[in-house]
Amino acid sequence: MRAELGDRLVVESPTTGAAGRDGEIVAIRHADGTPPYEVRWSDTHEVTLVFPGPDAHVRGAPRPRVSEPEPVRPRAAPKGRTPHPGDIGRRVASERRNRGLTREETARRAGMAPEYLAYLEEQAADPTAACLARLAGVLGTTPVALRGGDIDLPPGRGQALLHPRMQDLGPDECRRLLSASGVGRVAVSTPRGPAVVPVNYEVVDEAIAYRTAPDSVPAAAVGSEVAFEVDHLDEATGQGWSVLVVGSARVVTEADAVRRLTESAHASPWAGGEREMWVSIRPTRITGRRITEGGQ
């Protein structure tokens, strides 16, 4: 089976005399026009990924006469990108997990087949604008963000709440937010002046721990009192929180402690390179704030 953009995929009904189903092929995955296809169904206007079975056939759309056949225009991933999975798929999967949604629930809310959402998350897919807009609405973000168009923009550019309310967080809530681990910022004094740098961190025995190199800026925290900050901003809702930890930093030298930290690390340092020095911050003060809608 081969098709071109604009062709119609017709699925015959197995019941004699019953109406079948058809839809417009809006995306083709392979340059030779073979399946799978993205199809916009006539009865629901939903776009789903289809692997045609023996009961399906392609009906060509009317085309102008040309001396050379029109080329098939596959929707391929941009050059230079890792093909499995694609950038859009990784962002969709990350946003979905952050909101605690299953693929099935996300697909149902977005009006698409779960199989198509799985394909989108796991392959170098390039969904249609309508499909991406529906997903963005379900995930509380924007199509631009899912395509990575805001990757170089600082957070907090979205519209503020109409009636924002700032509330202080108690120590237990601050520790709960910190315990998720991730990326935080450590503020240190260096010979060239104050500096704030991001680091991947872990929480072990209520202490903040991060990996770095001995000659790096984060290593300058050792032997002094420092500030460590973690936050999260949701531009789609205008809400967010931040937690600030103040405490003394030291190098972790005990072999068992280093091994425990290394084995429990959730991720490798994003900056890469050799970063085998563990720094631990024992909190002496923890404070936090949250921004919510004034009516909540």
Image (cartoon, rainbow, N blue to C red):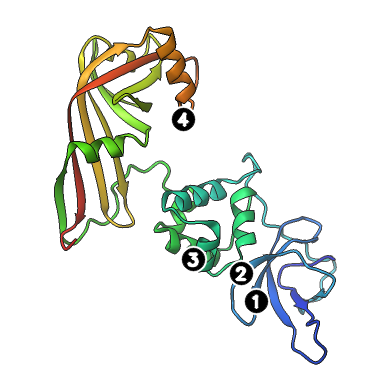
Q: Secondary structure at mark 2?
A: strand
CA gap between label 4 and label 1 equals: 43 Å
Asked whether the beta carbons under mark 4 and mark 2 sit within 8 Å of each other, the answer is no
Q: Which mark is residue 47?
A: 2
**Which amino acid type is marked by label 3?**
Arg
Q: Residue furthest bottom?
A: 17
Q: Secondary structure at mark 4?
A: loop
Q: Secondary structure at mark 1?
A: strand
- Image-based side of 216 in relation to 296, left or right: right
CA gap between label 3 and label 1 equals: 16 Å
Closer to the camera: disc 3 or disc 4? 4
**Which amino acid type is marked by label 4?**
His
Which residue position is annotated with label 3? 134
Give the crowd class for mark 3: few <14, some 14-19, many >=20 residues within 10 Å.
some
Quadrant position of residue 21:
bottom right
- Image-based side of 104 in relation to 192, left or right: right
Residue in the foreground of this view, choosing between 220 and 64: 220
Figure quadrant of the C terminus:
bottom left
Residue in the foreground of this view, choosing between 281 and 218: 281
Residue in the foreground of this view, choosing between 68 and 193: 193
Asked whether the beta carbons under mark 1 and mark 2 sit within 8 Å of each other, the answer is yes
Q: Which mark is residue 238?
A: none
Whether 60 is drawn above or below 238: the answer is below
Q: Residue at x 76, y 55 (%)?
A: 30
Which residue position is annotated with label 4? 266
Q: Earlier in the sequence, mark 4 or mark 2?
A: 2
